[in-house]
Image (cartoon, coloured by chain):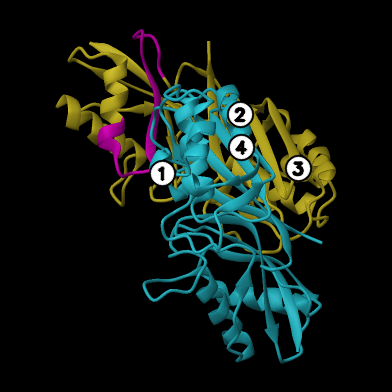
Chain colours: A yellow, B cyan
Amino acid sequence: MARFKLIVEYDGGPFVGWQRQDNGISVQGCLENAIFNFSGERVTCFSAGRTDSGVHAVAMPAHFDLEKPMSAFRVREALNFHLKPRPVAVLSAEEVGEEFHSRFSARSRSYLYRIVNRRAPLALGAGRAWRVASPLDVDAMNDGARFLVGNHDFTTFRAAQCQAATPVKTLSALSVRRQGDEVLVETTAPSFLHHQVRSMTGSLVEVGAGRWAPEKMQAILKARDRSACGRVAPPDGLYFQRADYG
Amino acid sequence: MARFKLIVEYDGGPFVGWQRQDNGISVQGCLENAIFNFSGERVTCFSAGRTDSGVHAVAMPAHFDLEKPMSAFRVREALNFHLKPRPVAVLSAEEVGEEFHSRFSARSRSYLYRIVNRRAPLALGAGRAWRVASPLDVDAMNDGARFLVGNHDFTTFRAAQCQAATPVKTLSALSVRRQGDEVLVETTAPSFLHHQVRSMTGSLVEVGAGRWAPEKMQAILKARDRSACGRVAPPDGLYFQRADYG
């Protein structure tokens, strides 16, 4: 038996999310079918993060085991061949030890949230960003973001359907920067609650638009109340960027 | 009568190109229909450049005339409302003098060609870039590009169906740079021949991949022979970036 680690890029638009589900096509299902098509083996493909429907990945680590001996190069080529025409691409494949687990070995995950800050709707960025018409003050957003960094009870930023054992998480980094008409929110943590990044981003947009003072981020965090949260940002702008191991 | 100058963004994927044609949906047709829908006026919408099917625009200047008085703000809002759900967005609209013509007043046009230089197929970049698997040497590409800058007969880089009066054009700039796994080709000229940017890019990729010496760019230019040209790069990676006026 050999274990393969993949780095996968995908456009989340056509999928019900990473995880295999009965109600539509998933990234996991596409990968598992592609693996079956070239190896004849029915395997489970694990990932560092389970993204929601519409959420993209720039570099999602994943892994699976194969009985049949095969080079990592052939695994990558065969996967990319059998994944067509789905918007899923295996950027790299390497053989790793049995102790590696894409989910449990990951020390941290990083996400990017991409906002296009302009009045006009999105043409090139449709499905790939959130268009926010109100001019956003990035300095105010960073002032607000600072209150969330650290170890906190993130109940306010947690979806009702979240399955995590505890709402207490450590947020390692959360920062906002402007690049032309784009406003980019970047965040890193050992792990996130369900909808946490989109909930934090939606609330930071309230601050950036001037509807909330930066200090309100601290107040809503302390409220530990889902109803205190701002609008949950749409999935289109969210990208799983990377996971760090070891 | 008032003349309006627009700056338009579009995803070229679903269109037969900028120009109105009988065989499908065009960007020009979408804009003219949207203008009719809010004004009741049948107008011609001109642009700085007539992009091919699949070619995108980041900021395409265009203009049209309206009899009915209307503010530029309302023109932009009404256009964006009526353009839905097509991937065409009016970034700005302003009233300009009758002497302005988006095509004839433009002093220069700039294009970007986006290559993703990797073995894996494109997922997030599908339809938005050209995937080139061979590692590209950007320095060699720039060495080759230098031979094309200036006033030359560009017959080698001109499509058979090109309608320009002469193949002699002045190329103001042509440069190549790497950004992560992307290789970006940028070029500016007062005007371009049909397929010129895609033809130059395809030939530069031959140089970058090491199949041609940089000097071969000079040889094929001097040949003034379409058959000397490299592969024409696909439309997916081409973006009309801007036109400069006055």
Q: Residue furthest left?
A: A40
The kind of residue tagged 2 is Asn
Same chain check for tags 2 and 1: no
Please say if the residues under marks 3 and 2 sit with CB atoms less than 8 Å apart: no
SS at mark 2? helix
Residue at (54%, 54%) from the top-left corner?
B167
Q: Chain of mark 3?
A: A
Q: Chain of mark 2?
A: B
Give whichever of discs 1 and 3 has the lower sequence position: 1
Determine whether A74 is above or below B42 in the image: above
Which class describes the residues within 10 Å of circle 2: few (<14), some (14-19), or many (20+)?
Answer: some
User: What is the distance, in whole Å, between disc 2 and disc 1 at their CAs?
Assistant: 42 Å
Camera-side mark, 4 or 2: 2
Residue that label 4 marks: A112
**Left or right, residue B77 beside residue A3:** right
Whether the magenta-drawn stretch holds residue A1 is answered as no
The kind of residue tagged 3 is Arg
Camera-side mark, 1 or 4: 4
SS at mark 3? strand
Please say if the residues under marks 2 and 1 sit with CB atoms less than 8 Å apart: no
User: What is the distance, in whole Å, between disc 1 and disc 4 at their CAs?
Assistant: 17 Å
User: What is the distance, in whole Å, between disc 4 and disc 2 at their CAs?
Assistant: 33 Å
The kind of residue tagged 1 is Gly
Q: Magenta residues?
A: A80-101
Pick the residue in front: A126 or B58.
Answer: B58
User: What is the distance, in whole Å, between disc 1 and disc 3 at their CAs?
Assistant: 28 Å
Residue that label 3 marks: A178
Q: Is residue A202 visible?
A: yes
Determine whether B102 is above or below A173 in the image: below
Total marks shown come to 4
The kind of residue tagged 4 is Leu
Residue that label 2 marks: B142
